[in-house]
Image: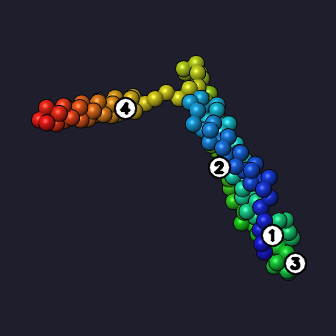
């Protein structure tokens, strides 16, 4: 059985993934939530496209095997729906909790992340300083 993918459906899947991942990179939990939902829809559409064209029910004795639909992509799509729903409810709970405690739903930087970023800046500055010193020493010796 050959599977042909419609170009417009491939563009729709790419657009869903692009928009979803863009929203996942935002700092607002509501935008992250919408990004998860959009990526979930893209995954479901991709799985349905991978399943091929519609066919007969996969019941032995009802139809020849070449006319049957592969049930695996449908089962994986159902699993993806459940996972997306679980992530959606978890992120809704996080956003609600953040809104009630802080008054906003923005994800802040971790204190450890800021400390590491400052350390990296200091190391980069010290490396630049040593490179400048070495260059000055080479110029002085010439």
Q: CA distance from mark 3 to mark 2?
A: 32 Å
Q: Is residue 93 visible?
A: no
Image position, residue 16 (x, y; %): 71, 45
Compared across the picture, whether 27 is left or right of 50 comes to left
Cβ–Cβ under 8 Å for marks 2 and 4: no
Q: Which of the marked residues, 1 or 2, is nearer the chain's N terminus? A: 1
Q: CA distance from mark 1 to mark 3?
A: 10 Å
Q: CA distance from mark 4 to mark 1?
A: 53 Å
Q: Which residue is mark 2?
A: 83
Q: Which of the marked residues, 4 or 1, is nearer the chain's N terminus? A: 1
- For this rendering, which residue is in front, 4 or 96? 4
Q: Mark 1 against mark 2, which lies toward the viewer?
A: 1
* Residue at position x 11%, y 35% in the image: 141
Q: Quadrant of residue 136?
A: top left
The mark found on residue 69 in the picture is 1
Q: Mark 2 against mark 4, which lies toward the viewer?
A: 4
Circle 1 sits in a helix, a strand or a loop, which is it? loop
Crowd band around label 2 with a 10 angstrom C-alpha radius: few (<14), some (14–19), many (20+): few
Q: Which of the marked residues, 3 or 2, is nearer the chain's N terminus? A: 3
Q: Which residue is mark 3?
A: 63
């Amino acid at each position: 059985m050959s599977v042909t993918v419609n170009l417009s459906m491939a563009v729709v899947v790419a657009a869903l993934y692009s928009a979803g991942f863009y929203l996942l990179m935002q700092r607002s939990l509501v935008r992250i939530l919408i990004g998860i939902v959009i990526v979930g829809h893209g995954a479901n559409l991709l799985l349905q496209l991978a399943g091929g064209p519609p066919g007969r029910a996969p019941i032995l004795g009802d139809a020849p095997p070449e006319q049957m639909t592969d049930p695996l992509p449908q089962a994986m799509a159902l699993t993806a729906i459940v996972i997306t729903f679980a992530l959606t409810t978890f992120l809704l709970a996080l956003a609600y909790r953040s809104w009630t405690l802080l008054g906003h739903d923005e994800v802040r930087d971790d204190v450890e992340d800021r400390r590491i970023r400052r350390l990296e800046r200091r190391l980069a500055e010290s490396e630049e300083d040593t490179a400048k010193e070495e260059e000055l020493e080479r110029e002085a010796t010439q």
